[in-house]
Amino acid sequence: MYAIVDIETTGGKYNEEGITEIAIYQFDGHKVTDQFISLVNPEREIQPFVVNLTGINSNMLKNAPKFYEVAKRIVEITEDCILVAHNADFDYRILKTEFRRLGFSFKRKTLCTVQLSQQLIPEMESYSLGKLARALGIAVSDRHRANGDALATVKLFKMLLHKDLDKAIIKKAVKVEQKSRLAPNHKEIIEELPTETGVYYIHDANGNIIYIGKSNNIKKRITQHFTNTNSKSKKIQIQVAAVTYEKTGSELVALLKESEEIKANKPIHNRALKRSKFTQGLYSFTDEYGYVNLRINHIKNDKKPITTFTNRQSAISFINKMVETHQLCTKLCGIDKTQTSCFNYDIKECLGACIAEESTDSYNKRANAVIEMNSYDNKDMILIDRGRDINEKSVILVEDGVFKGIGFFDLNHQINNRDILASLITPMENNRDTQHIIQSYMRRNKRLKIIEL
């Protein structure tokens, strides 16, 4: 659990500042669960430059509560939370100073979104909240007011959680939470999980990730882990201390994140990923008569397939569908082994490419359409799928046929501007696994929105 904080102060000498406004959003990593927003009477003068910056003046604060009147609420909403702020050292120092004036100590673990942004979104022109939000397409209202800046920090932090493929942030949070509570039982863990699509992380008591998985129903899948009697499940049941998750909305995003994060974190209970989860590939060649031939073959290390398949059955099903849909020749697709005309020619469903009756230009146009449809070589495109909530979409970026990564957006200008789009994207490795995942999903999901850039 996190408490995302922004504080406005009077300005002045170091450690003599007072709070004029505070906003705290309690955030569970997915949604805001509680909030506290208030002006505060600092009982001291506000520096003129601060009045000009924030618009908060002494007249506005005459009837505002003093810090001691809001202190209990601040303690409650930040209890067992990691304090998150943009330049956390400042906000945390101010809170500790105010509590010290009351004769109390205030101790919390902290995370700074400036430092996290520098690590996870390198090469930004500036890491000030306003300029960073603008570069990422994050809408900010009431800049330099506590509530506006805190809300912008919530949106930024949510993006940073998504970009943290090593899961360092959630590992730290789990470790903090486990120290402050008795070990939860399996039922308590399951009750807090969603029935939605995403990636889940099973942690031990030290916050370490011991298993990563993907599911279209996270709660159902974790229940299976906790009730199965196989060897791996029994080990997980003994070691589990917490389960965290990241909703993706899109199954494609979940598949890509699972693949990337298993490689990055190497959890002890994830079986080592096979070098290839797929065994069959679609290949093409031009024969001596000039016709484009398609073939399903075992994956070859020395030749790149047009697209890949998990098993031969799904590959044969695919090629049969292409023959039917595009009126291709079964002989030129390797289905019919005859030396003469193919079976489909005899029943008038092949136009005669098998016996050179159809022109190469006519036939190759349809065969190349199949190749074009099932390959993204040399293409610049984005795939748009479901997001984590109704107002959001997910985006997968491919540049020059290379998978670049994934992200989320809620405003169209975020994907129409290439610089903002690049900032939104969480970079990921382009490999055979990702190529197979994307191509297989594109074949299965005809409603997937594809935009060529």
Image (spheres, rainbow, N blue to C red):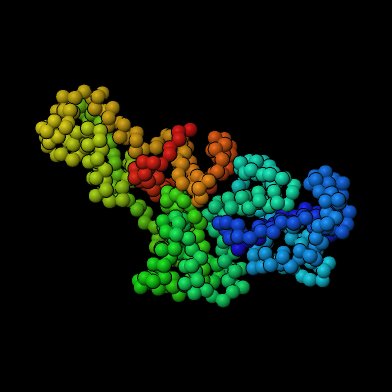
Q: Residue at x 27, y 30 (%)?
A: 366
Farthest residue to the bottom: give it. 182
For the N terminus, the image quarter is bottom right
Residue 266: x %, y % from top left: 47, 61
Residue 180: x %, y % from top left: 61, 73
Q: Identify which residue, 308 or 253, lies in the foreground.
A: 253
Q: Residue at x 45, y 75 (%)?
A: 238
Q: Is residue 357 above or below residue 70?
A: above
Q: Residue at x 34, y 45 (%)?
A: 444
Farthest residue to the front: give it. 63
Q: How many marks?
A: 0
Q: Identify which residue, 383 or 387, lies in the foreground.
A: 387
Q: Residue at x 43, y 34 (%)?
A: 379
| Residue 61 appears in the picture as rendered | yes
| Residue 262 appears in the picture as rendered | no
Residue 362: x %, y % from top left: 25, 24
Residue 79: x %, y % from top left: 67, 68
Q: Identify which residue, 299 or 151, lies in the foreground.
A: 151
Left or right of 389 in this view: 93: right
Q: Is residue 235 above or below residue 84?
A: below
Left or right of 410 in this view: 284: left
